[in-house]
Image: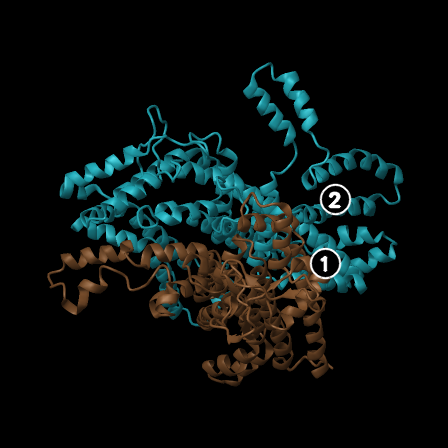
Amino acid sequence: MLANIVILGGYIASFWVVWATLLGAALLLSAFSNVAPTLRNKPYSSITSFALTLGTVGMVTVALFSSPKLGLATVWALYVLWPVFAVLAAVMVVSWIFKSRLGLYGRVFESPIGMVGLGICFFWIIAALMADLLPLYGPLEALSKNNGTIVQGVTRKFKLGAEALNGMTYAEYVKLSLVEAGEYGKLYKSNIRGGAPLMSWVGDEGERLPAILGTDKANRDIFSRLIHGARTVLPLSIGATLVSFTVGITLGLIAGYRGGWFDQIITFVANAILAFPVIVLFYLIVLVGKDGNLSRVLATAIFAFPLLLVLAGLWGLYSVKMGRLIGILVVFLPIALFLYFRNTWGLPDLSGLAAWAASAFGGGNSEREANIAIAVTNFAQMEPRMLNVFVAVAFSSAPGAFRLVRGLTLDVKDRDYVAAAQTRGENQFYIMIFEILPNVRGPLMVDAALRIGYTAILLGTLGFLALGLPQESADWGSMIAHGRGQLRFEPQMAVIPALCIVSLVLGLNLLADTLREQSLKD
Amino acid sequence: MLTFAIRKLIILLLTLLVVSAVVFVIVGGNARALRTIAVLELGPRTPQTEQDRYIQRTIFHQCDPGTGAEVVIEAPDNPAHPKGFYIDPEKCRSLSLAERYGTWLFGFLQGDWGNSIVFKKHVAGYRGVLVDPQGNEKPNPDPWGVINERLANTGMLAAWVFGIMVSLGLFIGILAGMNEGSIRDRSLSVVAIGSTSMPEYVMGILLVVLLAGNSMVFAALGSFVDFLPISDSFLGADKWARKSPLQGSANLDKDGITFANTVLPVSAVIIYGFGYIARMTRASMAEAMRSQYVRTAVLKGVPRYQVVLKHALRNALIAPFTVIMLQFPYLLSGLVVVEVIFSWKGFGWALNAGASNMDYNLILACSVVSVIVVLLTQFISDVGYVLLNPRIRVA
């Protein structure tokens, strides 16, 4: 019973109380801080950050180690991820040493909160890059076809009865009491359908790693899927944000700089898109539009903007040096147009080439031929379902970027350096892209960091509502949706992916906040 | 001022027209999806002509009213038609997308929002009389449509969320912005950033795990009560300690809206939303506290609470007003997610059900209604900003 009380403390502390503590600590500390002019200009008071960090770390530690299996899982996770932490530490230390030479990026290291944010972002980026080097299972690899072993485990504990209680997690205790309460049939079924609990060795022989966070319904290792999930979430959210920013920058610069009817029309369209709640837009684009060509039409429009932005920049730079411009375009245009049409309408169709390549290089091995055919057919092309999601997310966040850039351009366009460039007779594209854009980069970078986080949240929403993303995809939103049915028995199945999203977004938000403060110091 | 409002209103109507047309084209112009529905409803082996007729008569009002195509036929076996009459497909001609949009728009404006396939009833409710094959008139037994009852449920949820979220956000923002750079400001800002990083689905999951029904916390509380040297019935401990009174999934048809099924969805949306409002309020408040008039008031020796409440706050609340009104689209999105998580049978739940089953009229109606709500809040924000801010004069 005593063990249960310790466990109880851990679970309550694990999350809900961290929040209340942060709020309470903030209010308590505020009692000591009447208008203190000495504090005003300090970037971050060391007492606050120390207290907050200590509180959070303490709470998390208590929560983790109050349950033996959770503690063991943490140790295993740290062990598996040690190369990631090593690289992370190296990157942070090197950046710290050279921070004075690294411009705005280096100045993030002057604030502890910014360092925490940057560290979290780097952690996920490095984990996504190194996922294949770690001793993890594949994101789609089922550990064992036989789920029965798990059920046997529970039955064995049931037979052991009260002696088994000491080393159990609370989830297991609840399970056991359910068994005692006669809900055995229900539990049995849910275990057949659901996966293995925390830290179980469920695979066949010769497995390299326990299922640190258990397995899901298809008996895939959740921990491996989490780390591999960063490979879906990060490229999609960063890519969609970048594309939506190129849309916003292209249209916003022209609308803000030129004004007139173009400005009015684009502003009207942007406001019309912003009038949709994002989810309604997703239902329309992803669910209703998936049978038609809607996502291809939208992709045609959206992917044109990166191309147009580069062309406008080249025109601005080399409009008087036609020879060089043509030289660059001869190299640039074919590649860009190839990528553009591959990712919008799937043109040119490479299936003929794929068949030829498969017969030429397959060497009679049918599996190898199939692999070659798939690789060639999908060359430089986003998977259609991913394209659908990518386009939906980029489309929904483009109007916000447009409004931001337009406002900044209106603010900046009457400055002296713009007037000077106009007097020099510079090309208007040159003025927009090489005079105005670099001078509004501060707010743009802050907004980009915030928007990547928001896009990650949107992707999570899409996965959570099972909209568009492939069912087996390892993104965190889908994993939350998979784990939802098991909340009472295996809460970590849904809670840990949820915390992954929160950590990524929190890191980006902290980073954005610091970037804002540091760029305001200029 | 009146001209300004009228101009805004005209832009609003224009936006609504354009948006509804676009939504109609997306939803109605999707031939393959229409075919999917017909096949789903009629079965896979139905001949194509039969499917065409189905598409024409159930999904769109494709016939001109004057052509005599509306024929009352006997005992329609399709429960999606509470009106009790069919349109004779033989007398119909196929309409273009633009004509279909026109017909839909006039029907929409007159309150005829079509039938929902999923819920087997009118989307907006049909309050007219039904005519049976003999020509007798009788009142419609179920005059409420899908949207009406669902919107009422969502309205209740939104009202709670909005009230608490705005007051909490303003309170924390004002507390933080009062002393910019102080420890209190820093800590509250971190809390606000934390809030904006916890989307509704994360918070919903966590709340269900921790606080709903037979959650671990309450099961653990139960064992804690067992451990205490008190009797189970002491203060009703046996009841509240073992099972949380809060529900992780709402059964609105049976219970109605109760405290137990409202607390968790409401808090999930609030926790995600209040941080943004708090940060905006903080920025605005901090700017007001730096201003000349506040400095003058402080130097004059006005008490601090008066400086904050009378001088700074009144000016600092103008910008958050706009921000709060512009939060409505995000609030609506959040409500959709939360309604799906807690199976709260409201507007968003209906939209999710409709969109998953390609329920045309329901998707159209839900999209247009949500856009109307958002545009109205934007209109209020524009007009209210001009009214509140004495520095702005518009003709």
CA gap, disc 2 and disc 1: 45 Å
Residue B93: assigned label: 1
What residue is at 70 percent from the left and 26 percent from the top? A352
What residue is at 62 percent from the left and 25 percent from the top? A373
In front: label 2 or label 1 = 1
Tag 2: residue type? Leu
- Color scheme of the displayed model: by chain
In depth, the one of B320 and B61 nearer the eye is B61
Residue B223: assigned label: none
Coordinates of residue B105 in the picture (x, y in percent): 67, 67
How many labels were placed on the picture?
Answer: 2
Tag 1: residue type? Arg
Horizontal side, residue B188 vs residue A492: left or right: right
Coordinates of residue B7 in the picture (x, y in percent): 72, 76
Asked if the residue under mark 1 is in contact with the one under mark 2, i.e. CB atoms within 8 Å, the reply is no
Horizontal side, residue A52 vs residue A510: left or right: left
In depth, the one of A24 and A271 nearer the eye is A271
Q: Which residue is mark 2?
A: A307
Q: Which chain is brown?
A: B
Horizontal side, residue B216 vs residue B341: left or right: left
Residue placed furthest toward the top: A363
* Chain A color in figure: cyan
- Tell me where residue B358 sits by quadrant: bottom right
